[in-house]
Amino acid sequence: MAQSLIRLMVIIAFGSFGTIAVHSLAKAWSGSFVSTGFLPVCLATIATVAFYYALKRTVPFIDASAQAQARSLDTLNAKYADAAILFSAALSLFLELCIIRWQSSVLPFFAFYKNFGLLSCFVGLGLGYALAARDRIPLVIVLPLLAWQFGFMTTVRYGLEIDLNTIPFREQLTMGMNVGNLSEILLLYGLLAIVFLITALTFMPVGQLCGRLMERRTKLRAYGLNLLGSLLGVLLMLVASFLWTPPLAWFALCFLAILLFTLKTPSLMMVGLSFTVVCTIVLAWPVNPLWNRVYSPYQLLEIGRSEDTGLTLISAAGNFYQKIYDFSDAQSTRWSKIREYYDFPYKAHPTLADVAIVGAGTGNDVAAALRSGAEHVEAIEIDPAILLTGRLSHPEMPYSDARVHAVVNDARSFLRTTEQTFDLVVYGMLDSHTLLSQGSSVRLDSFVYTVEGLREARARLKPDGVLSLSFTVLSDALGRKIYLMLQQAFDGRPPICVEANTDASIIFLESNDEKWALPPKLVEDAGLTDRTAFYADPSLHADVSTDDWPFFYMPQRIYPVSYLIMVFQLLALSLLIAVNFFPERPKVSHLSFFFLGAGFMLIETKGITEMGLTFGNTWQVIGIVLAGILTMAFLGNCAVQWFGIRRPLTPYLFLFAALSVGWYVAREGGFASTPLGRVETSIVLTLPLLFSGIVFSTLLSRKGQVSGMIAMNLLGAICGGLLEYNSMYFGFRFLYLIAIGCYLLAFASELRFPKKDTDELPVASSTIRYENVSL
C-alpha cells in the first residue's frame, strides 16, 4: 500500500511543483527560454525526484504506522466499538463538509461547482471502505495531505497572481467569470486534477477507519451507528455555520478527532501534531491583512474599501460582489449616473406607501427607497453577514430608519408566505455567487428567477403595483430571457426595458395595471435608454426558466456538452486511483449497491432542491433537509431490524410507487403553497428516501462484509452525481425517471446475485456510507 501511495503522491507533486515553478518563473523573467516551459519542467522534475527519494525513506515508517493503526482498531475494547463507529462516521462527514466549504472559499471554480469536491471525497471514502480489510490503514498521511492541500491552494490563489476567474463551460454564464482561452482552461483542469487526487487520498484512510470499525458489529447495527454519526457531522456543521466560524475552527475539530485515533502510538501522535501546527499556520495566515474575511453561512465574504468611493466593498467567491454608495448629498454630481440608476425604479410609481426590496444587500436600494419617500420598506436579504455589513457601514444608515423592516430570508420564500401587498417590488441586483448545496448544480438564486417565482412576486403587488427587476445582463440572450419570463408572468404583456449607464445593467419594469405606461420623459431625464424594442425582437432566442428547469444563467436550453470534459476527467482520475490500489479486476456481486447509490443520489438531489423551493433556500432549511435525509435512512435501517424485513421485493414495490407518485406530482406542478401543501410535499419527497433506506438495509442484512457494500454504494453515488448534470437539459422532474431506471437495475442485479457474495471485491468492502456522504 505504501508504494501505491507514493506513486500517486509523486504524480501530485509533479503537478504541484510544475504549477508553482511555471508561474513563479514567468512572473520573474520573460523570454523564449521560460515561455517554452523547458526550465519550469526541469525544476519541477528535479523537485519531484527529490520528493520521491524523501518519500522512499519514509516507507518503513508509513508501513509500520499503518500496521499499528490497523492493530489498534482491531484490539479496541469491544465496549467502545459503538462509540468509535459513531465518532468515525461523524469525523468523515464533517471533514467532507469542511473540505467542500473551504475549497469553495479559495478557488472560485468550487463556489459554482461544489459537487466536484464532493465527488473527490466520494472516491476517497469509497476506496477506503473497499480497502478496510487490508492490514494497513495509513491514517498518518491524512494530516500531511491536508497541510499539502491547504498550502498548495493558498499559494496558487494568493501567491502566484494567477487569474483563476475561469469557467471552462460555455452553456451556462457565470457572474464575474469568463470562459478563458485554451491555456487558462488547461491550467484550471490541471489544478482540478491536483486537488481531486489530494482530496481523494486524504479521505481514503478515513474511509478505511470507518469500514474497519463497522466490521466489529453486526451489519445493521453498524450501519445504523454510521448514519447516526453522519447526522452528528451535519449538526456540527450547522452549529459552525450558525456561529459564522472560520475554517480554522472547523478543521481544529477534525484535527483533534484524527489525533485521538493515534493515542496508542506516540510516534504517530507526534507526526500528527507537527502537521496540525502546519495546517493551523496556513489556515490562520492573513493572506490579505487589509481585507476582513467573514465566513457567513453561505460563502466567504471579503470586506474592504473601494478605491473610488472610499466606502465598503464586498467580494464573494473571489469576485466583486457589492459596493456601498453615499448619495445623501443631493448636490453631489460625482455619482449622479449611478444614483439615477438606484433612484429610477422608485419614480415608476406615484405613491410609495409599501415597498419590498428582495436582495436588499448592504442597503443602497433601501436608501434609495427612503430618499424617494417610501413610508414602509420590507428589506429582504438572505445572507445575515451582508445585512450586518450594511447596518454597520452604510453612511446613510438605511437599516436604522424606523420605516425599514429587515428580513433575513430567501426572497422566494418571503414572497410566497407574506400576506402584505406592495406598491413596488424591487429586485435589487439579486445574483448569487454560490450553489444551493454541494450536491446540486442549482445556484442559490435560481428559483427566484423562474416564471413561477415572478408570478408569486406579482401576486404581492397591489392592483396598480409595479415590479422592477434590475440585473447585469451578461449576454443579449439573458436579457431576452428575463423579458420573456416577465411577459409570461404578466399574462403576455411585455415589460419595459431600460438600460442604465452603469455595469451593463438593465431595469425591467411591469405593472399589475394594464393601462400603466412609463413616461418617456422620465427615462430621458434620468439619462437612461429605452431598450424594450431590442429585447422584444423574436429573432433573439432564449428559453425561460421554470421551477422544473431553474437554470437562470443558461440563456438557451441546450445539452451541457462542455461538462462532459469534466465528467471524463473525473472518471479518468477515479480510474487512476482505483487501478493503483486494485491490480485485480473488481467483481460485480455488490452491483445492486452501486445502482442503489446512484438512485439515492438522484432522489436526494431532487429532494434538496424541491424542499428548498418549498420552505426556502436558506442555509438552515438546507441543513435541516440534509439531516432529514439521514434520519429517513436511519429509520429505514430501524424498520428492517424492528419488523424483521428480510426480502427486498415489497420495499422495492413501495419505492417504485413513491417515485412514480413524485414524478406525477412534479409533472402536474406540485402541491399548493399552503401549510397542507407543504406537508404533502414533504411526504412525497421523503418517502422514496425511506423506502430506499429499507431496501438497502434489507440487502445489507443478507450479504457479506458491510464495508464492501458501502464502497460500491459510494461509487454509485459518484455515478449519480454525474447523472445529475442531465437536469441542465431535461429538468429536475427527469431525475425521477433516471432514478427509477437505476433502481430497476439494482433490482435486476439482485436477481442475478440474490444472496451470497460469490464474487467478492479484492478487498474488504464497505457499507452504505454513501447515504451519509452524499450530502
Image (cartoon, rainbow, N blue to C red):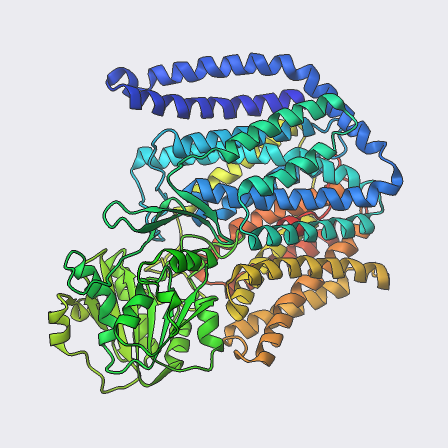
Estimate the x, y position of residue 441 in percent, counting from the top left: 47, 54
Report the side of 465 relative to 3 (left or right): left
Answer above or below: position of 464 versus 772.
below
Question: Which image quarter: residue 459?
Answer: bottom left
Residue 135 showing in the rendered view: no
Task: Name the residue rendered at 43%, 81% in the picture.
Answer: 420
Q: Quadrant of the N terminus?
A: top right
Answer above or below: position of 289 versus 519.
above
Which of 733 and 420 lies nearest the eye of the viewer? 420
Which of 728 and 447 lies nearest the eye of the viewer? 447
Which of 768 and 338 lies nearest the eye of the viewer? 338
Estimate the x, y position of residue 738 in percent, counting from the top left: 56, 59
Task: Name the residue rendered at 15%, 63% in the picture.
Answer: 331
Question: Which image quarter: residue 656?
Answer: bottom right
Report the side of 607 relative to 260 (left or right): left
Q: How many marks?
A: 0
Estimate the x, y position of residue 349 in percent, counting from the top left: 25, 80
Residue 396 showing in the rendered view: yes
Estimate the x, y position of residue 443 in percent, counting from the top left: 44, 57
Answer above or below: position of 204 versus 479.
above
Report the side of 401 relative to 207 (left or right): left
Question: Which image quarter: residue 397?
Answer: bottom left
Which of 568 and 621 lies nearest the eye of the viewer? 621
